[in-house]
Amino acid sequence: MASTDEYARRAFDFVSRMQNATEYDEICAEITKELEWFGLTAFTSLHNVGPSRSMVDCLLANTRPEEYSLRYIAKNYIEVDPLVTELRRNVHMFSWDDVRANRPLTKRDRWIIEEGREFGLTDGLTIPIPTASGTLDVFSPCGLDPNLSKRARQALDIICTFAHKALQLAVIGKTRQGSR
């Protein structure tokens, strides 16, 4: 188990690296490397999540296994996923285990969460990031047996929020370069 100071050091070191990163692929590599320290092996970053937007339209980055992602989109899980519906009730960070423990789940709800096991994804976080327009962005890392202790969650809140911001800035920068 890491010391409290180690969590703070990692979070602030990551923020420093993200403030200097501009290339999308470099940012994704840094995010992946940092999240692996916590046992998180994949992540999804979504922008302006809402009922009228498809998951593909909202996607900034996704490193979850391709087969898992394609199945999720094909089955339109975004409409019924208990982790997504939890966002309608909760604007604070939560884990998959929190949802399993804190609300009654239907057989379908449990199946959607458990389907990730096939791909080495058994728990993760959903980190809502409010926008000035009133919508939510979401950063969601996951893995097989991640460290989601209270202190790890505090560090991950900082790390994932800055990761999301860095991805947004890289996408905006790329769009602006393309319009010159």
Image (cartoon, rainbow, N blue to C red):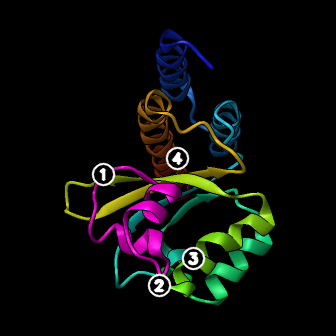
User: Disc 1 marks which amino acid?
Assistant: His
Which mark is in front, 1 or 3?
3
Q: Which residues are magenta?
A: 81-105
Closer to the chain start, of discs 1 and 3, is 1
- The residue at the point 46 percent across, 49 percent down is 168
**Are the residues at dot 3 and dot 2 in contact (C-beta closer than 8 Å)?**
no
Q: Which residue is mark 2?
A: 80
- Seen in the picture, residue 34 relative to 49 is either above or below; the reply is above
Q: Which of 102 and 33 lies nearest the eye of the viewer?
A: 102
Q: Amino acid at mark 4?
A: Leu
Task: Give the structural element (helix, strand or loop) at label 3.
Answer: helix
- In the image, what residue type sits under mark 2? Val
What number of labels is visible? 4
Q: Nearer the viewer, mark 4 or mark 2?
A: 2
Residue 4 percent across, percent down from the top left: 48, 14
3D distance between C-alphas at marks 3 and 2: 11 Å
Q: Which residue is mark 1?
A: 92
Alpha carbon distance from label 4 to label 1: 21 Å
Query: Label 4 to label 2, Cα distance in Å?
Result: 27 Å
In the rendered image, which residue does mark 4 sit on?
167
Tell whether 55 sits left or right of 41: left
First in sequence: mark 2 vs mark 1: 2
Above or below for 169 versus 36: below
- Residue drawn at x 80%, y 68% is 118
Left or right side of 76 for 144: right
The quarter of the picture where residue 65 lies is bottom right
For the residues marked 4 and 3, what is the alpha-carbon distance in whole angstroms? 31 Å
Which disc number belongs to residue 110? 3
Magenta region includes residue 100: yes
- Quadrant position of residue 89: bottom left
